[in-house]
């Protein structure tokens, strides 16, 4: 019998929030109704001030911490949360002190309404008819979820990569609804190289013979080959050159002769194909297209004369911005751009560049300096809550 570690949130069960109020989208599309799947960890205090919102990245979902139980009672717990290193009792996002909420974004494929969901107007999956959703749409839908939970103000909104973009948008769209904003391994907009990588991945999917213009559900198939290639491309960009050399080098399986069989020979080839196969089994192709487009479109400065300083002029929260030295997909300079814009607005901002070799995926890993930075900052957030409570009750007596 599997026993979760003592510093884990344990076995968790997803929750479902349904919304009948239409959601007007930035693309001028509209969802008449929708649902959001989410998980929570920890306990919400009576005045509902200790809540933290976690925004997930491109291929993430609501399962950020703890374990899910397999339906098969003979099986052990499975599927550890994607940020289990960061969320739990005594961890940086300490569930002994915070109530943590992580939703699966609209357009997702893990239970929230998305392309694979049934369109009530047709009785069939939305497929390519699902409207384009953007970071702003996600933030607005998350604000509605906040209202449902009775949370007026978040102690912090936190995200890495695409999640960091959502956290930043929260500080712009709802400046009075968060006290702290943590932007990790992110950017204020994608550069041309990143947009190019996303388009190559999308083309791999769209040119797969089984894509069928996005209507593959009714044909009981999926563009698995395209998805596999898209994920392989992504993984190459998530790791640094040094990390790939350290993990794989040029290790070559022994062969009697060179040939054109194109079976995996180098260890890196086996790794990438393994990651591609895993991804095909858990992610929807239309969702991948939608999420990468949301990444491409994100640019809060575009509505402010292309000035990030102007876009961030109304923010009220404190900020922690974290980058990683080996992250070439979201390079440290992109984080420093955010910091400079915040400083120009006299915002209270802390910045840390973590020296490491793991590349963009560093934000998911248990890197000592990174963990310490997060623990220190969020410890300050927790202490603020404690001091506020003492102040409201007239001190210690």
Image (cartoon, helix red, strand yellow):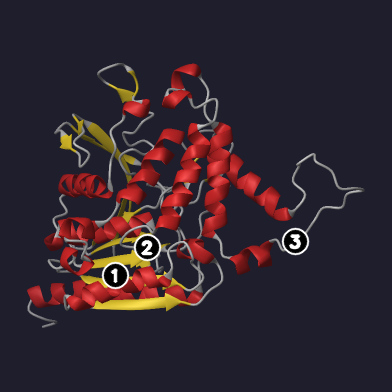
Q: Name the image quarter holding the C terminus.
A: bottom left
Is the C-beta separation of discs 1 and 3 under 8 Å? no
Residue 250 is tagged as: 3
Q: CA distance from mark 1 to mark 2?
A: 9 Å
Residue found 37% across the figure and 40% down from its top: 290
Q: CA distance from mark 1 to mark 3?
A: 38 Å
Residue found 43% across the figure and 40% down from its top: 288
Q: Which residue is nearer to you in this view: 41 or 324?
A: 324
- Which numbered disc flags the more N-terminal residue, 1 or 2? 2
Q: Which residue is nearer to you in this view: 366 or 360?
A: 360
In the image, residue 278 lies at what x, y percent?
58, 42
Is the C-beta separation of discs 1 and 2 under 8 Å? yes
Mark 3 Cα shell of 10 Å, populated few (<14), some (14-19), many (≥20): few
Residue to which mark 2 is pinned: 186
Q: Is residue 103 above or below residue 91?
A: above
Q: Is residue 382 visible?
A: no
Mark 2 Cα shell of 10 Å, populated few (<14), some (14-19), many (≥20): many
Mark 1 Cα shell of 10 Å, populated few (<14), some (14-19), many (≥20): many
Instruction: Indicate the secondary structure of the residue bearing disc 2.
Output: loop
Is the C-beta separation of discs 3 and 2 under 8 Å? no
Residue 338 is tagged as: 1
Residue found 41% across the figure and 68% down from its top: 91
**Would you say 186 lies left or right of 347 here?**
right
Instruction: Indicate the secondary structure of the residue bearing disc 1.
Output: helix
The part of the image, by quadrant, that contains residue 173 is bottom left
Q: Residue furthest bottom?
A: 397
Residue found 45% across the figure and 45% down from its top: 199
Q: CA distance from mark 3 to mark 2?
A: 31 Å
**Would you say 283 lies left or right of 25 here?**
right
Instruction: Indicate the secondary structure of the residue bearing disc 3.
Output: loop
């Amino acid at each position: 019998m599997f026993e979760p570690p003592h510093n884990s949130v344990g076995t968790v069960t997803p929750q479902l929030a349904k919304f009948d109020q239409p959601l007007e989208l930035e693309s001028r599309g509209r969802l008449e109704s929708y649902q959001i799947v989410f998980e929570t960890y920890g306990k919400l205090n009576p005045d509902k001030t200790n809540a933290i919102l976690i925004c997930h990245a491109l291929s993430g979902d609501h399962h950020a911490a703890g374990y899910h139980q397999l339906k098969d009672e003979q099986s052990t717990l499975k599927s550890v949360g994607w940020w289990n290193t960061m969320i739990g009792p005594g961890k940086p996002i300490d569930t002994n002190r915070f109530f943590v909420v992580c939703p699966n974004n609209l357009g997702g494929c893990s239970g929230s309404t998305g392309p694979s969901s049934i369109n009530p107007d047709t009785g069939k999956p939305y497929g390519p008819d699902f409207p384009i959703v953007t970071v702003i749409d996600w933030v607005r839908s998350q604000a509605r979820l906040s209202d449902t939970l009775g949370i007026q103000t978040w102690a912090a909104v936190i995200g890495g990569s695409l999640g960091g973009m959502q956290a930043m948008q929260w500080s712009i769209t709802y400046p009075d609804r968060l006290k702290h904003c943590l932007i990790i391994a992110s950017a204020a907009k994608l550069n041309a190289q990143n947009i190019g990588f996303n388009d190559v991945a999308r083309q791999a999917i769209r040119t797969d013979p089984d894509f069928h213009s996005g209507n593959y559900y009714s044909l009981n198939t999926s563009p698995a080959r395209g998805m596999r290639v898209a994920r392989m491309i992504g993984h190459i960009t998530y790791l640094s050159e040094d990390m790939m050399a350290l993990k794989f080098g040029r290790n070559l399986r022994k062969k009697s002769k060179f040939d054109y069989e194109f079976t995996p020979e180098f260890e890196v080839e086996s790794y990438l194909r393994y990651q591609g196969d895993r991804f095909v089994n858990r992610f929807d192709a239309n969702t991948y297209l939608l999420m990468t487009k949301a990444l491409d479109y994100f640019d809060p400065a575009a509505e402010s004369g292309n000035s990030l300083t102007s876009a961030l002029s109304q923010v009220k929260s404190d900020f922690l911005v974290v980058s990683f030295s080996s992250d070439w997909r979201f390079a440290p300079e992109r984080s420093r751009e955010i910091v400079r814009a915040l400083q120009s607005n006299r915002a209270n901002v802390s910045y840390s560049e973590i020296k490491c070799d793991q590349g963009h995926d560093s934000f998911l890993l248990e890197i000592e300096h990174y963990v310490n930075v997060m623990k220190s900052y969020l410890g300050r957030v927790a202490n603020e809550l404690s001091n506020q409570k003492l102040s409201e009750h007239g001190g210690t007596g």
